[in-house]
């Protein structure tokens, strides 16, 4: 699914076939989840192939490494150019790009002795497809921000996400909604969360969530379109009186939520503020004007 015989990746200064790339089984990343990564998308736009917000993604990758003490020697410009080369070598346009910084062999709980950098890309549709999601409130909380660096996109953090998603699917739902340590809504396992109530969008503040780049794009869209959006803490009970809701993230893009714990939202998705944001987001990533989108 992710690579074929001729797929090319960037790995430690060289372009190599994915099937021939190797790593050490004693890597700190493999054993302890001590690594950092990004998820980035490229699009076939009216102006050619564009990586959406490459600088922001690679700046966050650099910041993630800094926060957890992983050496990182590439500039955002270098990684951006390398990513375009990976796309070109694999003849990819609409693609998902995965940079990974992983650590050298080290069985101790100390700073890494060295790191490797990998950039891969593959064709990948919207993570949740195009259907509206049936979401449950997870029994798994987001980690306490005093125990981990929540603003860092670190490999090991996603065990928490996998457990939440698996629990949701076992219960017959499409995805989970996770709370923070105080019982406030935080985010999805791999996406940020917004809900609409009385003409205003609400979303959790930073601190207990990943500062999503798509989340920031939603704020930019709302500012341009004069859509009111408020950051605040709220409990899941408030969502049962909400008008609509959506997840957003690079992999998911902007995806509608149909229900929370089986309770449908009162407003049809096509009439929601989320649908307006969704359409504007599609236009932005394709380098199109979204001035025609009517609020």
Image (tube, rainbow, N blue to C red):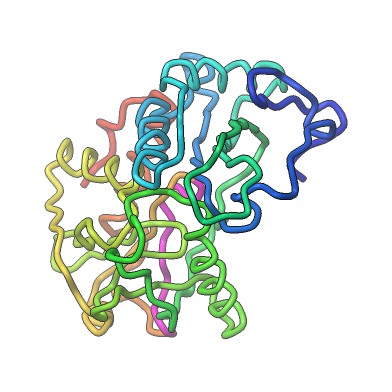
Q: Nearer the viewer, residue 89 or 10?
A: 10
Residue 92, image quadrant: top right
Residue at 42%, 20% (x, y): give it.
75
Q: Which residue is depicted at the point 43% across and 84% down?
A: 139
Q: How many marks?
A: 0
Image quadrant where one finds the N terminus = top right
What residue is drawn where x is 46% and y is 14%?
A: 47
Give left or right: position of 181 versus 48. Answer: left
Magenta residue check for 36:
no
Residue at the image position 71 percent from the left and 17 percent from the top: 89
Q: Position of residue 229 (x, y in %)?
A: 15, 54
Residue 111, given in percent of the width and then of the height, sits at: 47, 45
Position above or below: 196 against 45: below
**Residue 264 to residue 81: above or below:** below
Q: Is residue 57 above or below residue 193?
A: above
**Segment tinted magenta in the rendering:** 251-261
Q: Position of residue 144 (x, y in %)?
A: 31, 70
Q: Name, please, the residue furthest toward the right.
A: 5
Q: Which secondary structure is most common in the magenta stretch?
A: strand
Viewer-side residue, 251 vs 271: 251
Please state which of residues 290 and 162 is positioned toward the viewer in this rendering.
162
Name the spot of residue 118 as percent of width and height, x first: 62, 32
């Amino acid at each position: 699914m992710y690579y074929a015989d001729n797929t090319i990746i960037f790995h430690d200064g060289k372009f190599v076939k994915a099937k021939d790339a190797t790593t050490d089984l004693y890597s700190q990343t493999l054993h302890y989840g001590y690594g950092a990564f990004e998820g980035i998308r490229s699009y076939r736009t009216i102006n050619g192939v564009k990586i959406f917000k490459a600088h922001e993604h690679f700046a966050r990758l650099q910041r993630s490494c800094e926060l957890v003490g992983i050496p990182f020697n590439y500039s955002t410009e270098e990684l951006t150019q390398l990513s375009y080369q990976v796309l070109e070598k694999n003849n990819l346009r609409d693609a998902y790009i995965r940079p990974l910084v992983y650590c050298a062999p080290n069985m101790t709980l100390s700073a890494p002795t060295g790191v490797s950098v990998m950039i891969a890309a593959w064709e990948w549709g919207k993570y949740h497809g195009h259907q509206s999601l049936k979401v449950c409130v997870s029994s798994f909380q987001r980690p306490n921000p005093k125990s981990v660096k929540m603003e860092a996109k670190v490999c090991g953090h996603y065990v928490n996400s996998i457990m939440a998603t698996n629990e949701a699917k076992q219960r017959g739902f499409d995805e989970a909604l996770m709370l923070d340590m105080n019982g406030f809504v935080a985010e999805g396992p791999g996406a940020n969360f917004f809900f609409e109530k009385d003409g205003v969008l609400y979303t959790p503040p930073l601190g207990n969530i990943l500062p999503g780049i798509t989340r920031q794009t939603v704020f930019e869209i709302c500012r341009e379109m004069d859509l009111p959006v408020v950051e605040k803490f709220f409990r899941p009970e408030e969502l049962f009186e909400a008008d609509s809701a959506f997840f957003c993230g690079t992999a998911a893009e902007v995806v509608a939520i149909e229900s929370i714990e089986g309770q449908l939202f009162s407003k049809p998705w096509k009439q929601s503020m989320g649908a307006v944001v969704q359409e504007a987001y599609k236009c932005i990533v394709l380098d199109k004007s979204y001035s025609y989108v009517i609020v």
